[in-house]
Image (cartoon, rainbow, N blue to C red):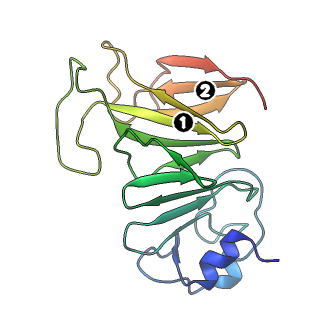
Amino acid sequence: MLSDRHACVAAGLGCTRRLDRSCRAPEICLRDPAGEGGREGPVPGGCDTFTDGRGRWIRFTADNRHRSVFSEGRLWIDGTPVGQDHTMDPCGWWLGNRFYVAQADGPDDHPAQDYTMGYLVTTINSLVVYDADRAIEHVFDPAPDEHWTDPRAEWADGALHLRPRPAAPADRVIPLARP
């Protein structure tokens, strides 16, 4: 039986190797996953992100147990709507095989909030983290003294580490139970 990744390749969707056109290297994209984490381009395992070039993004966990679909400004994880009350960035990512992370517009009442052009219109952003193993959505808004301009989440030691931008020290560490 074909996996969902195989269906994306068969449908002619573009992948992380060539987002501007349909898959031209199914011998790479159709490989079985190679461990945990993202697969981009010709590395062991097939690609994990596909697009139709018109704003629909489909991303898979390395173990193919979970799938995210971003289309028409909405996000679904394994068929469940996520972040319905938020404007979300379509460029979310899987954190291992359990969590899906996406940036969202931050709170309007944040003291450092400003507005700009782009997918997200706020300069201070929030994080939406969906625990696919437990089907639980978490929304993390920055506190008034936290300036999350490009927030990130990392999973380490049984906890989410929330950073205001890549390579910055964590503002918060949130312990989450294993499924």
How far across and down, in percent of the image, does residue 33 sit? 76, 63
Q: Are marks 2 and 1 in contact (CB under 8 Å)?
A: yes
Depth check, front residue: 70 or 142: 70
Is residue 28 depicted above or below 161 in this figure?
Answer: below
Position in image of residue 69 (x %, y %): 53, 59
Q: Residues within 10 Å of mark 1 (few under 14, many from 20)?
A: many
In the picture, residue 108 is in which quadrant?
Answer: top left
Q: Which residue is mark 2?
A: 160
The quadrant the N terminus occupies is bottom right
Q: Amino acid at mark 2?
A: Leu
Picture layout, residue 26 above or below residue 89: below
Query: Disc number at residue 165?
Result: none
Residue farthest toward the bottom in the current orientation of the protein: 24
Task: Give me the C-alpha separation between circle 2 and circle 1.
Answer: 10 Å
Q: Residues within 10 Å of mark 2 (few under 14, many from 20)?
A: many
Going from the N terminus, do you reach mark 2 or mark 1 first?
Answer: 1
| Residue at which label 1 appears | 129
Give, as a three-letter code, the residue at label 1: Val
Q: Residue at x 79, y 32 (%)?
A: 179
Q: Residue at x 63, y 84 (%)?
A: 10
Percent of width and height locating residue 89: 38, 48
Residue 63 position by quadrant: bottom right
Determine the secondary structure under disc 2: strand
How far from the left and from the top, in percent, is residue 161?
57, 25
- Residue drawn 62% across the image and 68% down it: 47
